[in-house]
Image (tube, grey):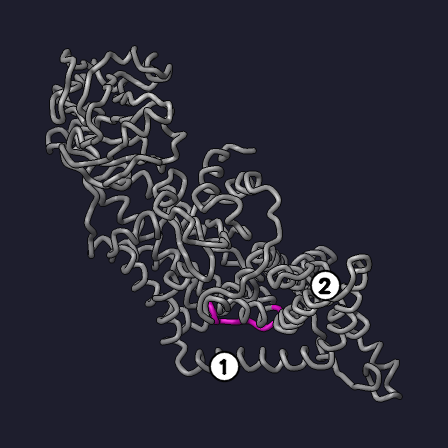
């Protein structure tokens, strides 16, 4: 396993364990679980877990937002889960729209990355053709680049045949077999039609059928409908065909029924449906493209948050796979830059050092079109910066549609999307428009978020104007000391008597041990909850003066998995001295065979000249326990 082994184990545990997981996929920033019972997942524990940005529940998926490194986390989660046993589908969940979104995302999400790569390759080819002239367009190199970009689109039904059949619960390779029949080259080049021209054209046992002029290559809807029927048929056949011959008779009968039916009925009907839906969306655009762009640009981030943007993706792919440019998503193009500008405003305006540090990677990833860290970690919790980015997105969406910007192929996100708006003949006009709009969106997002302001987090360390000047020149804050008052009542012991080497040897830092006589932990100072372990047996705090404190309730009590512990605060909560933090069952800990000792450690001990523990042997809530002497 990789470096995220511990995080992966914790995630699997908090989603209800391996036995609660039906399936797992991931996108650019999220682990997307299909759980048997979402009520078994500990959402609050996941949200408060280091390494997890937030949790979303939408489209029938339990989405754990990780960030840009989600592929690495996914590998370790897969290793923890092992091979998931096939589970019976208890029927669709959620309303009709949720089920539609879940179906579309499950089919297209696995192939979206190669689709984008193919689009970028076509964009590179267009750039080279523009830069090198007509000679390059007639060269073998151009032809190879063209094959790289067009190959996937030409055989797109085969890719969808796999993902759709898998989504519908059938055999994926059987889905590929059905799709391969649809893109059979003998039908596309007309040779079959010519051969059987005298008998009236293509037919199946005398029942005539026709193939679209361009064939079924690059189509989407026919293969989705065909695999939905095939998966249903396959399941029914498995119930009636004897086990001894299932291996070959189930796919045989599934194929011999589904493929002719697709040519005769399913394919023609779905082509009509596809054309109708596509023309309907185009009609909405044509009615008033500027209003359409404004609405799409304003709402795009909200749609993405709930996975609703997947409803538009198939129609974009359909248009592009047929060689038609589309402006269906043009209005959403600059939204990520508006969001990134808002993050920059927060980063420069906040006085909270931690928030500023979190904003830096969110800003960088936003330039590449990945905005989940920015949305969930920075702008959405502070509201106004998020709405500022939506407003700017609406304006740029309207302008983009007004300019008539179109996309010619699938492309990357953020700055990598520019190649998608270069026409096949090398016209870069729309790409230039996009660059200008993105720069304006970033600047406007910054300006509006700055002007609207936001409720800033409290500074990690409160500084006076004089101290701020000293900090800016590299001097430390000049306070004499920081006092830590007892969070628990009981008998005070030197840290060396802790029943855990990590504490007794001072590896974690200096502090004391208390053998508790009360079952309540209270805040030892004014500060912030930095870490609350899911098992509630340990809590990390930071005082307003910067003292970092770990309160560990019992030794090895993590094994109790939270049994007997109750928390009254959440991670990142502000607390005042004396506020109740956690209660614990002393008797239950002892009966389970664990020590009730409470080590209280200043974990940033090296930041101080000295850490002095009380000389008292008995302590009550609010009594002075530790004094940290701050060096000048």
Q: Which mark is residue 238?
A: 2
The image shows residue 285 at horizontal and vertical percentages of 44, 78
Kindly state the secondary structure of the residue where label 1 is placed. Answer: helix
Quarter of the image holding residue 404?
bottom left
Neighbour class for label 2 at 10 Å: few (<14), some, many (≥20)? some
Q: Is residue 322 magenta?
A: yes
Neighbour class for label 1 at 10 Å: few (<14), some, many (≥20)? few
- Nearer to the camera, 261 or 66: 261
Relative vertical location of residue 226 with respect to residue 265 in this rendering, above or below: above
- Nearer to the camera, 562 or 349: 562
> Mostly what secondary structure, the magenta segment?
loop
The residue that mark 1 highlights is: 280
Quarter of the image holding residue 47?
top left
- Specify the quadrant that holds the C terminus: top left
Q: Left of 163 or right of it: where is 389?
A: left
Q: Left of 511 or right of it: where is 106?
A: right
- For image coordinates 88% across by 88% down, the residue present is 199
Quarter of the image holding residue 497?
top left
Q: CA distance from mark 1 to mark 2?
A: 40 Å
Relative vertical location of residue 230 with respect to residue 80 in this rendering, above or below: below
Mark closer to the observer (1, 2)? 2
- For image coordinates 28% across by 20% down, the residue present is 597
| Highlighted magenta segment, given as a residue range | 321-329
Q: Is residue 127 visible?
A: no
The image shows residue 84 at horizontal and vertical percentages of 60, 47
């Amino acid at each position: 396993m990789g470096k995220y082994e511990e995080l992966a184990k914790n995630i699997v545990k908090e989603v209800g364990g391996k036995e609660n997981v039906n399936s797992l996929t991931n996108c650019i920033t999220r682990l997307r679980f299909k759980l048997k019972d979402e009520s078994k997942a500990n959402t609050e524990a996941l949200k408060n877990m280091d390494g997890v940005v937030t949790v979303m529940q939408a489209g029938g998926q339990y989405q754990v937002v990780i960030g840009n490194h989600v592929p690495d986390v996914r590998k370790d989660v897969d290793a923890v889960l092992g091979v998931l046993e096939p589970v019976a589908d208890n029927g669709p969940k959620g309303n009709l729209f949720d089920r539609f979104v879940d179906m579309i995302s499950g089919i297209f999400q696995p192939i979206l990355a190669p689709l984008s790569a193919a689009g970028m390759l076509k964009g590179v080819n267009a750039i080279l053709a523009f830069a090198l002239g007509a000679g390059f367009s007639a060269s073998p190199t151009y032809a190879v680049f063209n094959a790289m970009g067009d190959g996937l689109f030409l055989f797109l039904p085969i890719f969808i045949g796999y993902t759709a059949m898998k989504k519908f619960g059938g055999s994926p390779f059987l889905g590929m077999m059905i799709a391969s029949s649809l893109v059979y080259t003998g039908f596309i080049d007309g040779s079959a039609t010519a051969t059987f021209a005298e008998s009236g054209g293509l037919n199946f046992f005398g029942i005539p059928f026709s193939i679209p002029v361009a064939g079924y290559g690059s189509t989407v809807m026919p293969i989705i409908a065909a695999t939905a029927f095939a998966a249903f048929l396959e399941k029914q056949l498995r119930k009636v065909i004897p086990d001894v011959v299932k291996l070959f008779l189930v796919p045989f009968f599934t194929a011999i029924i589904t493929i002719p039916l697709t040519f005769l009925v399913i394919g023609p009907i779905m082509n009509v449906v596809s054309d109708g839906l596509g023309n309907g969306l185009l009609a909405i655009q044509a009615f008033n493209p500027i209003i359409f762009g404004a609405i799409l640009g304003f709402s795009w981030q909200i749609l993405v948050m709930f996975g609703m943007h997947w409803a538009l993706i198939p129609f974009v792919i359909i248009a592009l796979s047929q060689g038609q440019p589309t402006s269906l998503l043009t209005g959403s193009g600059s939204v990520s830059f508006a969001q990134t500008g808002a993050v920059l405003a927060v980063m420069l305006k906040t006085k909270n050092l931690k928030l500023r540090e979190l904003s830096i990677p969110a800003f960088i990833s936003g330039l590449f079109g990945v905005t989940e860290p920015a949305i969930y970690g920075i702008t959405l919790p502070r509201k106004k910066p998020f709405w500022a980015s939506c407003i700017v997105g609406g304006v740029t969406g309207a302008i983009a549609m007004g300019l008539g910007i179109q996309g010619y192929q699938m492309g990357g996100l953020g700055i990598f999307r520019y190649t998608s708006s270069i026409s096949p003949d090398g016209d870069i006009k729309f790409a230039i428009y996009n660059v200008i709009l993105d720069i304006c969106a970033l600047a406007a997002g910054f300006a509006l978020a700055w002007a609207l302001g936001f409720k800033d987090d409290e500074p990690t360390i409160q500084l006076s104007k004089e101290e701020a000047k000293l900090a800016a020149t590299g001097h430390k804050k000049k306070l004499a000391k920081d006092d830590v008052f007892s969070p628990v009542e009981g008998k005070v012991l030197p840290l060396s008597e802790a029943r855990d080497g990590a504490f007794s040897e001072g590896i974690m830092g200096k502090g004391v041990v208390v053998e508790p006589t009360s079952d309540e932990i209270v805040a030892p100072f004014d500060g912030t909850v930095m870490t609350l372990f899911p098992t509630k047996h340990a809590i990390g705090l930071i005082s307003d003066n910067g003292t970092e404190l770990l309160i560990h309730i019992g030794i090895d009590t993590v094994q109790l998995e939270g049994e007997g512990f109750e928390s009254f605060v959440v991670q990142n909560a502000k607390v005042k001295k004396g506020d109740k933090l956690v209660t614990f069952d002393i008797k239950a800990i002892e009966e389970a065979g664990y020590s009730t000792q409470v080590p209280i450690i200043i974990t940033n001990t090296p930041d101080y000249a000295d850490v002095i523990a009380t000389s008292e042997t008995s302590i009550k809530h609010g009594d002075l326990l530790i004094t940290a002497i701050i060096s000048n």
